[in-house]
Amino acid sequence: MDFNVEKCVTMHIGSKNIKFQYNIQGRQLDTMKTTRNFGVQISSTLKSADHCHESYCKANQLLGLTKKTIKHRNPALMVRLYKSLVRPHLEYYSSVWSPHYRKKQDAYRKKI
């Protein structure tokens, strides 16, 4: 199998990883702490904070753009726009950001 060496990178998962340097075709691969795969931000710690922040920022941008461009804010129209434009960014791959730590669950409950 041929690999595009320019696109290949390594990611060391876990704190006890020995961080071995890998080579392909005599070229040392770069090491990344975070990367995007299938639209999901993945970090070397496997925590979801980066993905959550990115999803929140994108959804917030779209919400602001919607509010800025729609002059007559009919509630039914705004709900349809929210469900079709904003909500998919918040729900995409939601199993990544599902709060499984007790402190995150408590923080989400306080915000609601």
Image (tube, rainbow, N blue to C red):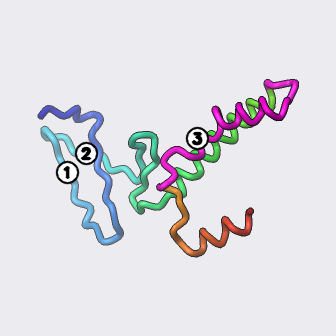
Quarter of the image with the C terminus in it: bottom right
Q: How far apart in space, not on screen, are marks 1 and 3 (Cα)?
A: 35 Å
State which mark lies toward you, 1 or 3.
Answer: 3
- Amino acid on which disc 2 is placed: Leu
Residue 79 within the segment the image draws in magenta: yes
Residue at 79% in and 24% down: 69
Q: Which quadrant of the figure has residue 99? A: bottom right
Closer to us: 71 or 47 = 71
Name the spot of residue 82 as percent of width and height, x first: 70, 36
Name the spot of residue 52 as percent of width and height, x first: 57, 52
**Is label 2 in a helix, a strand or a loop?**
loop
Residue at 60% in and 46% down: 90
- Amino acid on which disc 3 is placed: His
Q: Which mark is residue 89?
A: 3
Q: How far apart in space, not on screen, are marks 1 and 2 (Cα)?
A: 6 Å
Left or right: residue 54 compared with residue 9? right
The residue at which mark 1 appears reads as 22
The residue at which mark 2 appears reads as 29
Closer to us: 104 or 7 = 104
Closer to us: 37 or 112 = 112
* Main secondary structure type of the part rendered in magenta: helix
Q: Which quadrant of the figure has residue 28? A: top left
Magenta extent: 69-95
Quarter of the image with the N terminus in it: top left
Q: Are marks 1 and 2 in contact (CB under 8 Å)?
A: yes
Q: Is residue 50 above or below residue 2?
A: below
**Is label 3 in a helix, a strand or a loop?**
helix
